[in-house]
Amino acid sequence: MAAKTIADLDLQGRRVFIRVDFNVPLTPAGGVSDATRIRESLPTITHAIERGARVVLASHLGRPKGRIKPELSLLPVAAYLAEALARDVVLADEPAGDGAKKVVCDLRDGGVAMLENLRFSPGEEANDENFSRALASYADVYINDAFGTAHRAHASTVGMAKYVSSRGMGFLMDREATQLAKLVGEVARPFVAIIGGAKVSDKIGLLESLLGRADAVCLGGAMANTFLCAKGGSMGGSLVESSKLPLARAFLAKAESMGARIILPRDLVVAEDVKAESGTVVAAMHVPDHSAAFDIGPETASEIASIVARARTVFWNGPMGVFEAQPFAAGTQAVAKAMALVMGGTTVVGGGDSVAAVHRAGVASSITHISTGGGASLEFIEGKKLPGLAALES
Ligand code: ADP
Ligand code: MG
């Protein structure tokens, strides 16, 4: 059966365990430097508080690898949250054990407690049974709102779920699952995918899965260099993954045999160095020896924009160039703006850098869905069943 959402469940007076993704970047002084992920889960937390739940929050932070690392304590996150909610948030001194048990026991209706960084325990990433049972012992209701870790089978995302009879998605998880589902199965056509970014290896699974599903796949960014090289292009000093050339060739051959439309850059912006003050436009297969490609060229950008303009569904992951540097940001900006102009269709952006580019282009509010999960959104769109979502089905 499909997963319920927190809105379907009885919360009053019950211990509601919410797995959130509070894996936020910290400042050198140990404060929260970007609270987007905390804000994204506020509707779920507030809903539980308003329904009189005893709220138990749990998250990981960074990569402590099963050991207690004081610099990765959730203390700054609890402090930020307390301010945002204008109420006390009691932080347990451990993810599980007597201290955690006491903090949960002391909760009153409408109160909020937080467990310490889940990954301080080796049981979290190992999806250990004892750790899963310990977490479940703090829960009458289990809610997962951590979409960013839904592709991982850990104790807090999978292991504990079966020990809690009442379970469901938080509002953020529900929104991600509903919006991303529009890109899987019956998709409104034309369906266009734009895939860029740094590495072919990160995204080859996604690319293969798009063959036969997408009406057009546009490639840009450093990953396009590898495909251009595979087709015999001279790429100069551009970033090319030589070890992935056979993979790229096999992909292009498969696409051709299936009649799938793959759009590779026809022009590129090159420079001798990424720190250059400006770039030069060259034909895509002819990057000069002492230059490297750092962006798609204007002809490619307008070709992609016109394909996007006719689409009913667009998915974008991975910038078209080194958009962090102003001389190489135009291709990425053009894609962001083209997506924002799609009327009456579904536009979805996933991936940390692509999402940042959409914000930088100032068009975030014109995009149907901006996914909060990088790896999780790619696996979802590949058609894989995310373990964290599967565990919520009843
Ligand atoms: P996302 O986070 O959206 O999934 P990736 O992490 O895969 O995207 O890729 C983003 C990175 O790729 C950026 O840091 C960008 O500078 C880099 N990149 C894009 N195009 C190029 C290029 N032509 N040469 C070098 N780096 C590139
Ligand atoms: Mg990235």
Image (spheres, rainbow, N blue to C red):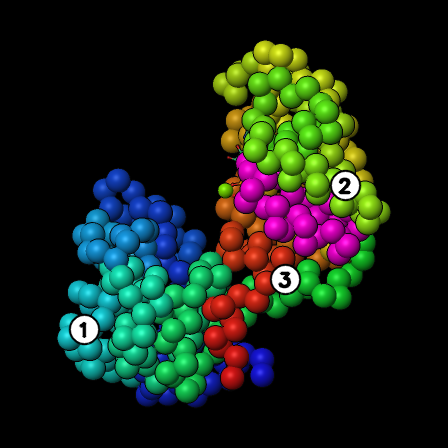
Give the distance between the C-alpha atoms of the residues marked 2 and 3, in whole angstroms. Answer: 22 Å
In front: 26, or 88?
26
Name the image quarter holding residue 14: bottom left
Q: Where is 105 relative to 276, above or below?
A: below
Residue annotated with mark 2: 253
**Residue 152 percent across, percent down from the top left:** 44, 62
Query: Is label 3 or label 1 in front?
Result: 3
Residue at point 55%, 38% (across, down): 199
Residue 87 falls inside the magenta stretch = no
Q: Is mark 3 within 8 Å of ligand 1?
A: no
| Three-letter amino acid code of the residue under disc 1 | Gly
Looking at marks 2 and 1 on the same chain, the residue that comes earlier in the sequence is marked by: 1
Q: Position of residue 350 (x, y in %)?
A: 57, 51
**Circle 2: residue type:** Ala
Q: Which quadrant contains ligand 1?
A: top right
Q: Residue at x 35, y 79 (%)?
A: 16
Please tell me which of labels 2 and 3 falls first in the chain: 2
Q: CA distance from mark 2 to mark 1?
A: 56 Å
Q: Identify the mark nearer the N-term, 3 or 1.
A: 1
Say which residue appears at 43% left-offset and 85% top-offset: 166
- Give the residue number, with chain letter if any, for mark 3: 383
Numbered range of the magenta stretch:
192-220
Name the one closer to the observer, 203 or 32: 203
Q: Which mark is residue 97?
A: 1
Q: Nearer the observer, disc 2 or disc 3?
A: 2
Vertical relation: 355 (above or below) 169: above
**Between 85 and 357, which is closer to the camera in this rendering?**
357
Lateral position of residue 351 relative to residue 110, left or right: right
